[in-house]
Amino acid sequence: MERDIARVIITQEQLAHRISELGAEIAAVYPPNEDLTMVTILSGSIVFFSDLIRQLPMKMHIGLITVSSYGGATTESRGPQLLDDLNVDVTGHHVLIVDDILDTGRTLRMVRNRMADRGVRSVRAAVLLRKTAKAPADVHAEFVGFDIEDEFVVGYGLDYNNLYRNLPHVAVLKPELY
Ligand code: IMP
Ligand code: MG
């Protein structure tokens, strides 16, 4: 697997360091003793989500929502599809949506809108990566791990054709593989 990589963009150490900082940023925002549900957008955010929640000291509920990714290295062909709706009741809760990457913003826009319809107390979003060139102004993530260039990355949960999610770093594949 490692030999498919052209370049590491973010190392394991950089990920761990930034995620502990993000944990502190997030913990500072939520009042204690109010219900918080952390919602992971499957499948891309599983690795980030599991590391991030362990940096948070407060009580929290966990929710899952499944949104389809596209099959390849381009998002232009079709928009996100809801495959499995949120599995828990978030009425009256603070909701923090966690996703792997903010690219065109369509996934986050859809999930944010669905949460806002559920009588929640607040909705915020945390993304590990943001492609600054593309992220539209109307789709906001309150917590961002890293801003990156507009190139297709894999690892740490992010996939190409459902592979490479288990790479411990964020990387770019060799061009002949795309
Ligand atoms: P958006 O809806 O275009 O913002 O895309 C968000 C989703 O597309 C993410 O949750 C990822 O699953 C996928 N995605 C976007 N860019 C990349 C990338 O560079 N590598 C892997 N997946 C990506
Ligand atoms: Mg995804």
Image (cartoon, helix red, strand yellow):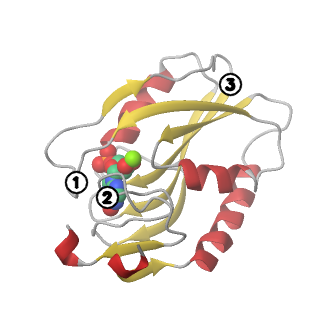
At horizontal 85% and vertical 38% (from top left) the residue drawn is 32
Q: Which residue is mark 3?
A: 93
Q: Which mark is residue 160?
A: 2
On the image, which quarter does residue 123 sit in? top right
| Mark 2 closeness class: few <14, some 14–19, many ≥20 residues within 10 Å | some
Is label 2 or label 3 in front?
A: 2
On the image, which quarter does residue 19 sit in? bottom right
Mark 2–mark 1 Cα distance, whole angstroms, equals 6 Å
Q: Which mark is residue 147?
A: none
At horizontal 27% and vertical 68% (from top left) the residue drawn is 150
Q: Which residue is mark 1?
A: 72
The residue type indicated by label 3 comes to His
Residue 12: percent from the left, percent from the top?
59, 75
Mark 3–mark 1 Cα distance, whole angstroms, equals 35 Å
Element type where label 3 sits in the image: loop
Is residue 135 visible to us here? no
The residue type indicated by label 1 comes to Gly
Query: Is residue 1 or residue 12 the one in the foreground?
Result: 1
In which quadrant of the rendered image does the C terminus lie? bottom left
Residue 88: percent from the left, percent from the top?
62, 20
Residue 80: percent from the left, percent from the top?
29, 36
In which quadrant of the rendered image does the N terminus lie? bottom left
Element type where label 2 sits in the image: loop
Q: Is mark 3 within 8 Å of ligand 1?
A: no
